[in-house]
């Protein structure tokens, strides 16, 4: 316990050290005892089963017990678990039907909803029970966190592979638990997006919002307007080569995300943030002249031409193609920071654009500025304010019109904000966002007088003006993203910074095993 042998320090420091040391001192020192597993998000209920320990052995198999309609998907979940355990334990971990010491069953737990699950670990078996394969997947993410951190490694590690007996019953607080990756300001390869999906799925997030078009780059192939991607996607911030996803690439991202139970929400930002489109097609500009490609980081200077009929042909073509490639039920049309679109034009534009998106059969999602416009039934409005009255009013207005609100407060949930003044990249326009600040808020009370029933959930956006590779993305997302994931999943009564930061400390070794480039925030006692 090196912690107790620190040099002399002032009283406050000693008290803090004593408080931090308490949970460590409380750990029994008997042979196989381990600290209580650091689960994030915290489950709704968890009880220890004393005297029970499960040991994963070279003979352990994963059994699937599922009705015929769920068998294929449930088996897929079992195979993902088995693939990871095979990598880290070196055991065969076969997937079998109706047997196995690890059992994944879709017979039961129906009262816990589509994402809920029960998990029981005793000396004889590990059983995950859920009404759906999705619930099994969520349960398996918990199981992975119950295992030693080295179980997440990519290469064989030494055992023992033990889990303390436990009984868990769990289901999410919110249906919408997302993160956004801005692939426009800097382009990220399919492999990088998959890496982000892998990490997000470990924390039970279920939405991946992709910001596919902005001033600096258009990142998705559109057959009816091919220059959007080939020219509009050619650069990125700083003037380096950009890129775009072909339809096959995008389908692969959607498939990979779905296999990890994340739904992709594609965003084409309109009517502002459109320089890449305007540069690709002169006819989209009111003056008929295409501007140059833009590789800086200013916002608010571009606008689609509200008065031209071709603008709406363009939108119908683009959103039509995107909706056809999106199995999820939401398409995001942006709507933020349209500073060079006069307000009356903005409203005219949004009313038409949201109808176009709704006509594709998808729900409309947009940033909170769209709260001022006609919102089709089922619309979702994304609040990105900083406790300011104007943003709050727009969110409340949207709720009055029946929209659901997703909470992405920039001064708390924006993963691109610097942690502190020393953070090497990131922005600070919404303030510095420490790990504590990112965690310590309640989605249903953040905006006064917004009915709790209007809140669909939370999303942590990651804008990439200053982030040109996945290592930097990981640095900004970890350790803050798991905090927002917990706000989305765990009960309001479970939210507690002091307890959370102790559980967070336990994730560090897991991120080491996964080679995550996380920020070792000094306020966390990483272990
Ligand atoms: C504001 S948030 C933006 C983005 C920037 C971000 C940087 C929002 C809806 N718009 O265009 O990338 O700030 O933090």
Image: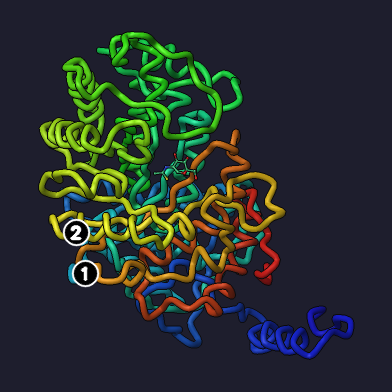
Q: Identify the residue shown where x is 30% and y is 68%.
A: 173
Specify whether 238 is left or right of 130: right
Check residue 197 in the rendering and tell me which mark sits there, or answer none.
Answer: none
> Callout 1: helix, strand or loop?
loop
Give the distance between the C-alpha atoms of the residues marked 1 and 2, in whole angstroms: 8 Å
The residue labelled by disc 2 is: 399
Question: Would you place residue 208 above or below residue 318 in this image?
Answer: below
Q: Position of residue 244 (x, y in %)?
A: 44, 21
The residue labelled by disc 1 is: 451
Question: Would you place residue 497 above or below residue 358 in this image?
Answer: below
Q: Are marks 1 and 2 in contact (CB under 8 Å)?
A: yes
Question: Would you place residue 172 above or below residue 177 in this image?
Answer: below
Quarter of the figure with the N terminus: bottom right
Disc 1 within 8 angstroms of ligand 1 (CB):
no
Q: Please tell me which of labels 1 and 2 falls first in the chain.
A: 2
Q: Position of residue 90 (x, y in %)?
A: 59, 50
Q: Residues within 10 Å of mark 1 (few under 14, many from 20)?
A: few
> Callout 2: helix, strand or loop?
helix
Instruction: Tell me the quadrant of ligand 1.
Output: top left
Front residue of 119 and 274: 274
Q: Residues within 10 Å of mark 2 (few under 14, many from 20)?
A: many
Q: Position of residue 386 (x, y in %)?
A: 43, 58
The answer to whether residue 504 is seen in the rendering is yes
**Colouring used for the render:** rainbow
The answer to whether residue 117 is seen in the rendering is no
Q: Identify the residue shown where x is 64% and y is 89%.
A: 26
Front residue of 97 and 169: 169
Q: Identify the residue shown where x is 67% and y is 62%.
A: 521
Quarter of the figure with the C terminus: bottom right
């Amino acid at each position: 316990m090196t912690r107790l042998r620190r040099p002399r320090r002032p009283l406050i420091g000693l008290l803090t050290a004593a408080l931090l040391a308490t949970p460590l001192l409380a750990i029994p020192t008997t042979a196989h005892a381990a600290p209580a597993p650091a689960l994030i998000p915290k489950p709704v209920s968890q009880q220890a089963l004393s005297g029970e320990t499960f040991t994963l052995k070279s003979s352990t198999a994963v059994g699937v017990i599922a009705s015929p309609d769920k068998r294929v998907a449930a088996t897929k979940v079992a195979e993902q678990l088995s693939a990871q355990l095979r990598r880290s334990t070196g055991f065969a971990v076969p997937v079998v039907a109706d047997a196995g010491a690890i059992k994944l069953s879709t017979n039961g737990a129906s009262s816990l909803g589509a994402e809920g699950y029960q998990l029981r670990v005793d000396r004889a078996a590990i059983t995950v029970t859920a009404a759906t394969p999705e619930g099994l997947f969520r349960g398996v993410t918990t199981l992975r966190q119950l295992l030693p951190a080295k179980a997440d490694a990519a290469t064989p590690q030494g055992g023992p592979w033990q889990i303390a007996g436990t009984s868990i019953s769990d289901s999410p607080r919110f249906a919408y638990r997302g993160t956004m990756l801005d692939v426009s300001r800097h382009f990220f390869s399919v492999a990088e997006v998959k890496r982000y999906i892998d990490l997000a799925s470990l924390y039970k997030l279920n939405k991946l919002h992709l910001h596919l078009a902005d001033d600096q780059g258009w990142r998705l192939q559109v057959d009816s307007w091919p220059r959007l991607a080939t020219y509009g996607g050619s650069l990125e911030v700083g003037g380096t080569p950009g890129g775009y996803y072909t339809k096959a690439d995008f389908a692969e991202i959607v498939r990979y995300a779905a296999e990890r139970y994340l739904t992709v929400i594609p965003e084409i930002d309109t009517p502002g943030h459109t320089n890449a489109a305007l540069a690709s097609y002169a006819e989209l500009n009111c003056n008929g002249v295409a501007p140059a490609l833009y590789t800086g980081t200013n916002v608010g200077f571009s606008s689609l031409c509200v008065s031209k009929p071709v603008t709406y042909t363009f939108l119908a073509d683009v959103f039509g193609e995107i909706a056809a490639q999106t199995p999820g039920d939401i398409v995001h049309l942006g709507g933020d920071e349209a500073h060079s679109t006069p307000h009356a034009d903005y409203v005219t534009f949004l009313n038409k654009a949201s109808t176009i998106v709704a006509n594709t059969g998808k729900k409309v999602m947009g940033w909170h500025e769209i709260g001022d416009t006609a919102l089709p039934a089922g619309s979702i409005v994304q609040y990105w304010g900083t406790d300011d009255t104007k943003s709050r009013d727009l969110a409340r207005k949207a709720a009055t019109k029946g929209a659901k609100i997703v909470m992405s407060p920039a001064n708390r949930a924006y993963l691109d904000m610097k942690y502190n003044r020393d953070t090497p990249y990131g922005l600070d326009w919404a303030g510095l966002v420490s790990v504590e600040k990112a965690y310590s808020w309640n989605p249903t009370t953040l905006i006064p007088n917004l009915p709790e029933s209007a809140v669909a959930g939370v999303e942590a956006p990651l804008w990439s003006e200053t982030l040109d590779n996945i290592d930097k993305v990981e640095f900004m997302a970890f350790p803050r993203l798991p905090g927002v994931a917990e706000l989305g999943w765990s009960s309001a009564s479970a939210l507690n910074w002091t307890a959370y930061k102790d559980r967070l400390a336990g994730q560090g070794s897991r991120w080491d095993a996964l080679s995550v480039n996380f920020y070792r925030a000094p306020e966390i006692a990483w272990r």
